[in-house]
Image: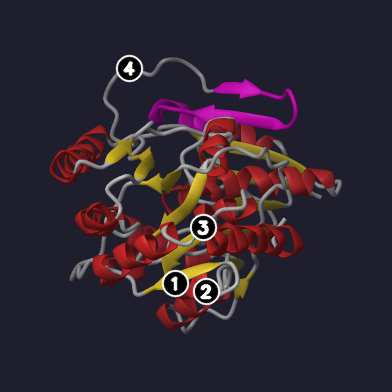
Amino acid sequence: MKVVHVTRDFPPRSNGGISTAVGGLVAALVGRGIECAVVSFDGYRPTRKDPCPGPPTYDDSTIEVVRVTHPGQVAQARDWARSLGADISHCHHDLLWELASDLETKHKVVTAHVLQREQNRLRQLEHDTLSSKAQDRAVSDADRVFAPSRAAAEILRQDYPEIPTIQFVPLAITDRVLVERQRDVVVCLGRFSDVRGTGDLIDALPLIAAARPDAHLAFVGGAPDNPRAERRWLQQIDEAASKTGLHIHRPGWVAGDEVWTWLERAQLVVVPSWVETFGMAAAEAMLAGAAVIGSDIGALRELVDDSTGVLVPPRNPLALGNAVVELLGDEPRRQSLGRAARRRIQQQWT
């Protein structure tokens, strides 16, 4: 059996949870003797007007990967993927479904790493977006639709009641050795976005500063491939740091060992998302032995419980700030939650 994965930013390039998830999935499949290849759209923008830099780059050092950065390379990548004679095409990004469905494989699968219609509802958008229209097409056309959590599967079934092929297939993460470091920082990990709760944490900073002026916070992440949005978020973070006097680190978008080092330093990790399909940031934090404060939403409830962290109402900076202050003042509880969190991930999600 051979599977060709159509995705964005396949490792070692990293663009967030999807990169981590797909990299781990491919490694797991190869470890089980399943042949895999990858078409990775790296920093891709379909509207690019500059001249094509040449053919897509090709790498077969461990598995076969072709990397596309320009619209002029898409046809060559499609021809290469077709030539593999794969049995399954597995699409991990709805906007790439057109290519994935055109590969002439026996079976076509999509994983819903983002719940596009749910995001539209949370943002109170009254119109479809390009992303939600793309997900509509992918879910309708795929032979099988995978959802990374039971909560995500249920939302998809409500949005697409006519689709009988939606099923829960959990993600997992790779176990890592934990180096004992001084835990001295509150970490918010991942993409800066309204639906990731970045603004809610910023709004909670004055409350945290009033109770814990000595606290150190780290916004480990950014808005990759969207420099305008990243500048806006960084400006808000800097303004909050100036007003509150808090020690705020913003190392930018980092990956791999550098992310892991921040997590090993974390007193606690804040995951204030409005919606998640799995909660990769929470899972990575738990594996690193950090207590998690997350939003009380479906996917995070499947990872975090009272023994491993604290869940607070989403979109509630007051509750979020109070939870951070409370845990910062209770080191024995933080340590107990972190140890239990690491055990739970190792036992159930690696």
Q: Position of residue 117 (x, y in %)?
A: 34, 69
Distance in Å between CA atoms under marks 4 and 3: 56 Å
Question: Nearer the observer, disc 3 or disc 2?
Answer: 3
Question: Nearer the observer, disc 2 or disc 1?
Answer: 1
Magenta-drawn stretch contains 44: no
Distance in Å between CA atoms under marks 2 and 1: 8 Å
Which residue, given by chain and number where applicable, does mark 3 sit on? Answer: 331
Q: Position of residue 16 (x, y in %)?
A: 47, 44
Q: Earlier in the sequence, mark 1 or mark 3?
A: 1
Q: Nearer the viewer, residue 252 or 202?
A: 202
Distance in Å between CA atoms under marks 3 and 2: 23 Å
Residue name at image x 69 percent, y 35 percent? 83
Magenta-drawn stretch contains 62: yes
| Callout 2: SS | helix
Q: Earlier in the sequence, mark 3 or mark 2?
A: 2
- In contact (CB < 8 Å): disc 4 and disc 3: no
Query: Looking at the picture, which amino acid does disc 1 mark?
Result: Leu
Q: Position of residue 308 (x, y in %)?
A: 58, 67
Distance in Å between CA atoms under marks 1 and 4: 49 Å
Distance in Å between CA atoms under marks 1 and 3: 18 Å
Which residue, given by chain and number where applicable, does mark 4 sit on? Answer: 51
Question: Nearer the observer, disc 4 or disc 2?
Answer: 2
Q: Earlier in the sequence, mark 4 or mark 3?
A: 4
Crowding near the residue tagged with mark 1, few <14, some 14–19, many ≥20 C-alpha atoms within 10 Å: many
Which residue, given by chain and number where applicable, does mark 2 sit on? Answer: 301
Magenta extent: 57-76
